[in-house]
Amino acid sequence: MSVNLVELREGGAQDLTSVNQIMQDAFDPQYGEAWTKPQCMGMLSLPGVWLTIANSDGVDAGFALAREVAGDAELLLLATRKATQRRGIGATLVRAVIAEAHARGAEQLHLEVRAGNDAVRLYCSAGFAKVGERKDYYKGRTGELFNAQTFARVLR
Ligand SMILES: CC(C)(COP(=O)(O)OP(=O)(O)OC[C@H]1O[C@@H](n2cnc3c(N)ncnc32)[C@H](O)[C@@H]1OP(=O)(O)O)[C@@H](O)C(=O)NCCC(=O)NCCS
């Protein structure tokens, strides 16, 4: 099933309440992957960082936060609201980040994701390949630790 219309726009500090709502809805607190609003605010104020918001049928339904520094880009956060998942919004955001990172001159796009996260399928189908593993990187609500996997995609 796909949504009728997904519009992408560049986000800013004024969108962080919406971003935070999407993040609280999307991320399972069991895994400790979500960021706080101040963390997002701090990151967004750094050079080379950009936020993309996906609006679906008039509602902010997802976002991607990314940065590009000296030819290397990183997808920092990606989330879509549960109610509109599996409709192509995540893939649309990933494609937009790939295009923007390329336009900014990056040669590679990196990301890290919790091992076992369903997003791994999305990243693999978008051309990312696994390049490493970070043990006990995420700390869940109950103190349980989860490995992170690092992925990269060549942009040239
Ligand atoms: C990961 C996430 C952003 C995907 O968003 P989405 O809008 O559902 O993505 P899409 O609809 O474009 O899905 C693209 C593909 O990803 C894979 N995928 C996404 N969610 C999946 C799930 N729950 N189970 C299995 N595969 C899944 C599928 O291959 C899917 O293609 P398909 O629906 O044709 O099978 C969303 O599930 C989310 O916000 N998760 C919580 C936050 C998170 O873990 N973010 C990633 C780490 S930063």
Image (cartoon, helix red, strand yellow):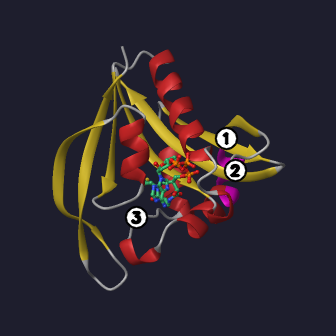
Which amino acid type is shown beneath numbered disc 1? Gly
Residue at mark 1: C-beta within 8 A of ligand 1? no
Label located before the other in sequence (3 or 1): 1
Position of 144 relative to 17 (above/below): below
Q: What percent of the width, then of the height, locates residue 151? A: 28, 40
Q: Is residue 26 left or right of residue 28?
A: right
Main secondary-structure element of the magenta-colored stretch: helix
Which amino acid type is shown beneath numbered disc 3? Glu
Q: Which mark is residue 33?
A: 3
Q: Is residue 72 visible?
A: yes
Which amino acid type is shown beneath numbered disc 2? Asp
Residue most toward the front? 1
Q: What percent of the width, then of the height, locates residue 95? A: 53, 31
Quarter of the image holding residue 107?
top left
- Identify which residue is drawn at 33% across, 53% down: 113
Is residue 30 or residue 88 the one in the foreground? 88
Position of 119 relative to 34 (above/below): above
Quarter of the image holding residue 102?
top left
**The residue stretch that appears in magenta:** 12-18
Residue at mark 3: C-beta within 8 A of ligand 1? yes
Q: Which residue is mark 2?
A: 15
Q: Is residue 31 left or right of residue 9?
A: left
For label 1, the SS is strand
Is residue 124 or residue 132 the one in the foreground? 124
Q: What percent of the width, then of the height, locates residue 13? A: 66, 47
- Identify which residue is drawn at 23% across, 73% down: 145
Q: Is residue 46 visible?
A: no
Is residue 119 or residue 65 the one in the foreground? 119
Q: Is residue 63 left or right of residue 106?
A: right
Q: Residues within 10 Å of mark 1 (few under 14, many from 20)?
A: some
